[in-house]
Image: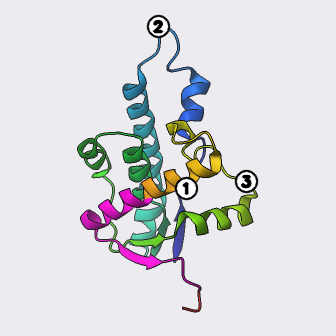
Amino acid sequence: TVRTRQKNGKYYGDIVYEKKFFKGEQGLGVEKTFKNIVSFELIRVLMAIENIIIPSLRAGFIVLADRYIYTLMARDLVRGLDDKWVHNLYSIALRPDAVFYLKLSPEKLIQRNFMKNHTLDYWESGMDLGLSKDMFDSFVQYQKLLSDKFDDMRKSFDFTIVDSDQSVDS
């Protein structure tokens, strides 16, 4: 078995503000800039497909790809990109044989996040979306929006839902 995990790296906003894409006359504009950054994120996934996933499959391994394209798609859709554009962009990625969606309530996700990181992340809290000035509140709202997008995608991509709110013993 080969396990991949999409590395988080820098989030879109970090790149945008670091490069000052929105400032001055040289700025590309919000939508075009965001679409370019999304395309770069897809390139990272495609490189993993070409360099890790396909060779592993050809060698007879089972590949477990954590996050793969669906997390990127959900984040892009929550941030307002056109559904058709997003689906078209990611359609070039390999379609997996099975997708397991580990559905977890925002409250449980917060607990797990604090156990692992001891803090909430600005981007994982959706603070860039202006949902709330309170990071905790924003985290809950953003994760709910992501969950709704995953539920929508479940219909298109035939996700198998795993209730992750239950204990391992359940």
The amino acid sitting under disc 3 is Thr
The amino acid sitting under disc 2 is Glu
Residue for point 28% across, 40% down? 82
Residue that sits furthest to the bottom in the current view:
169
Residue 128 belongs to magenta span? no
Q: Is residue 139 above or below residue 110?
A: above
Residue 99 picture location, percent across and down: 38, 71
Q: Which mark is residue 119?
A: 3
**Mark 3 or mark 1, whichever is nearer to me:** 1
Residue that sits furthest to the top in the current view:
25
Question: Which image quarter holds the C terminus?
Answer: bottom right
Q: How crowded is mark 2: few (under 14 residues within 10 Å), some or many (20 or more)?
A: few
* Label 2 residue SS: loop
Mark 2 and mark 1 in contact? Answer it, CB < 8 Å.
no
The amino acid sitting under disc 1 is Val
Q: Mark 1 or mark 2, which is nearer the start of the sequence? A: 2
Residue 155 picture location, percent across and down: 26, 66
Q: Write down the region rendered in magenta.
A: 147-167
Q: In this view, does 107 lie above or below 130?
A: below
